[in-house]
Image (cartoon, rainbow, N blue to C red):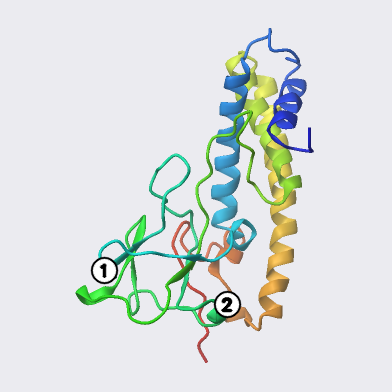
Amino acid sequence: MAKYDSADLLALSRQECRQPTTSDYPLDADVYEMLSRGQEDVIFRLGVTVPDSQYGAPTLLVSADGGYTFPFGTDSDTNAIFPIGHVEIYRTLDAIPNGPCSPVADFMFEGNLIRVPNNMTWSGPGPYARFITPPLKITASVQPVVKPVQAREALIYYAAAKIWRLLGNQENAAASMQDYERCFARNQLALRTQFAAMEAAAGLSAPQRSWANDIGQNGSGPAGTAYIYSTGP
């Protein structure tokens, strides 16, 4: 059992709720469901505040209609991927991070895909995308994907809050939710610090930084809006 893998999260969530065995309600399947909801909440919130922390490797998008549209692909459940929050589009891997394509001028977002404007087809290499894929449900065989590993601690408190509520203990549910918010805030602050420094190292001045760094601080930038880094003058 590795730290904060699915089995560890299950055991720690039960321990947090003083329901240590599978003979006690809730069942393992119920706990995994609550952990999955917690993971969705964490990734959605980080996806619109510190998106770089949850990105995977750049993905080459493939068109199925001759270059008019480019889907973000499908997940392991065969669902069309609708990225969470911030998305970046580039023509080549060498263009990352300072040579992004321009939304509207080069492409338009349509939920689970991008479309080339003016009924034209994509020209040249790419497109490559950096985005966050919605997570699958956590089970005994499907591991959590929140990054970094230590941020998964928040899932324990989220699951505990929901379990306490199912058990009818609203006081403990509220206390666990407070623990969740404190744990989330601590990890979010650490990630903001790390990735703000990375943007500065990449040569992005303050006016060019992603609006995501300002969410929860001065409110600039609409939550969930896809934004491409500006590299203007």
Sequence-wise first label, 1 or 2: 1
The correct choice, above or below, for 150 with respect to 162 in the image is: below
Residue occupying the point 74% across, 37% down:
4
Which amino acid, by three-letter code, is at mark 1? Answer: Gly
**Residue 68 figure quarter:** bottom left
Residue occupying the point 41% across, 58% down:
72
Tell me whether circle 1 and circle 2 mark residues in contact (CB < 8 Å): no
Residue occupying the point 53% across, 44% down:
135
Q: Position of residue 41 (x, y in %)?
A: 56, 42
Image quarter (top left, top right, bottom left or bottom right) of the N terminus: top right
Q: Which residue is mark 2?
A: 97
**Residue 160 figure quarter:** top right
Q: Position of residue 111 (x, y in %)?
A: 35, 56
Q: Secondary structure at mark 2?
A: loop
Residue occupying the point 43% across, 74% down:
126
**Residue 61 figure quarter:** bottom left
Which amino acid, by three-letter code, is at mark 2? Answer: Pro
Q: Residue furthest bottom?
A: 233
The correct choice, above or below, for 39 with respect to 8 in the image is: below
Q: Position of residue 16 (x, y in %)?
A: 76, 24
Q: Who is closer to the viewer here, 9 or 75?
A: 75
Q: Is residue 159 left or right of residue 16?
A: left
Q: Secondary structure at mark 1?
A: loop
Q: Which residue is mark 1?
A: 66
Q: Determine crowd level at label 1: few under 14, some 14-19, many 20+ residues with C-alpha closer than 10 A.
A: few
Separation (CA) of disc 1 from disc 2: 27 Å
Q: Position of residue 119 (x, y in %)?
A: 20, 73
